[in-house]
Image: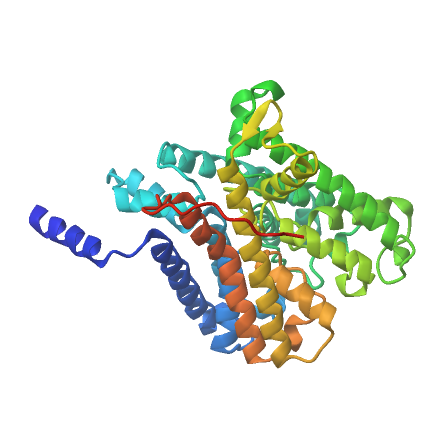
Amino acid sequence: MDLKRARGRLHLQSLRIPPPAVLALLYLGSVIVGGLLLWLPVSTQEQISLFTALFISTSAVTVTGLSTVDIGTTFSLFGEAVIMVLIQLGGLGLMTFAVLVLSAMGIPIGMPQRLILREDLNQTTLNNLTVLVRIIFSVALLCEAVGVLALAWVWVPQFGWAQGLWYSAFHAVSAFNNAGFALFPGSLSLYVGDPVVNIVIPALFILGGLGFIVVGDIYQKRKWSRLTLHSKLMLVGTAALIVWGFVTFAALEWNNPGTLGDLPDTATKLWASWFQAVTPRTAGFNTINTAEMHDSTTLMTMLLMLVGGGSTSTAGGIKVTTLIVLILATAAFFRRSTTLHVFGRSLKMEEIMKVMALTTVSMLLVALGLFAVSISHDGNFLDLMFEVTSAFGTVGLSRGATAQLDTFGLTLIMIIMFIGRVGPLTIGFFLATRSVPRVRYPAGQIYLG
């Protein structure tokens, strides 16, 4: 038996499949299995095509939230449960679940599994990966459990115990994993002025978007001075983006009759402004009609969608720390400074190069995606740009273009969602792999700007 296992390992190693490719295949396999399950008659209340099932599965596994059908009326309880499981798998990471199961069974985690897990968790080292897995599950289950209890306060009295608890569980999982799937028509617009929904749902996707390392660091250190540099940057960056988004959204949309202007009172307008300020950073829920937003607000929302959340989180985007390092590097350039300093720590040039590579690749992917989608669809350019940005950032917000796209356009959106979720992990593999040049060339000069 041991000889067979050894041969199996040698056979797998002989394939020499890089960890990012294995990870991509795992996500692709989950999409296909999820699509087939959602296509079953037991999963739906009204028949859907296999393509639609695959689109919803892709959106769930990539924790995006874009949909061509109404989830609450199209799928049965079984179908909704399948979507929730896919969201949890995609949000926390497929290899995270695999490692947890293997550890529970007493099976040691080998080096190939650790390499794949490193890519899934967006880490640069192999140290303490199993500890990080335990932290991820502890934080996720605790946050989701508290979210279920809090949301049940609203939905159990309205829908009864069974349906109320199910709504609470589904939306808690969807929110913490930054998926944006909702079981109500119009997302959460029916609860635009409800304090509980406007506090609990954002709290869940903000915690999920901060990253498990940050949440674990806060729990262990509990003092600002003892937090890691990454945690400090994430907390400051997240707070700044929330304040900027809240103030800007309220100022731009206050009198817009299609969004805030139609709301009954000031308190409801403030709740809606708060919600729309935090949801673009890959959460995907909405309490107002995003299609009615001004162009300026739409552009601001797209910028927030591109930034996203934190590393090792359920969020997508280029990440908050990436934006901060870009700003610091730009400021250092104009100050003629050769080093970056923040919170008493310095950043290496290697970190800046990583940020530049990730941002450049992300911008190119969004541009190419928009170009490809615009070829097959002749609709409003801003709506298409919003859709592509939402797909790449795995956000799920839409201005209505999803339902208008043809099969080719929807296929492109599926590819963009998949790249938006798996692509940065693959890029991270190359950023974490050092290559020592064998030949050195003399320095040259080029003129920039």
The residue shown at (66%, 37%) is: 237
* Residue 13 left/right relative to 29: left
The residue shown at (12%, 48%) is: 6
Is residue 67 visible in the rendered image? The answer is no
Q: Quadrant of residue 320?
A: top right
How many numbered discs, if any? 0
Tell me where residue 61 appears, x and y as whole percent. 48, 58
Specify the color scheme.
rainbow
The residue shown at (45%, 34%) is: 135
Q: Nearer the viewer, residue 128 or 366?
A: 366
* Residue 21 left/right relative to 9: right
* Residue 203 left/right relative to 114: right
Q: Is residue 53 above or below residue 364?
A: below
Q: Nearer the viewer, residue 270 or 371?
A: 371
Tell me where residue 322 appears, x and y as whole percent. 59, 43
Q: Nearer the viewer, residue 398 or 232?
A: 232
Q: Quadrant of residue 117?
A: top left
Tell me where residue 315 appears, x and y as whole percent. 57, 48
Q: Quadrant of residue 375?
A: bottom right
Q: Nearer the viewer, residue 353 or 424?
A: 353
Is residue 345 visible in the rendered image? The answer is yes
Tell me where residue 152 appears, x and y as whole percent. 64, 44
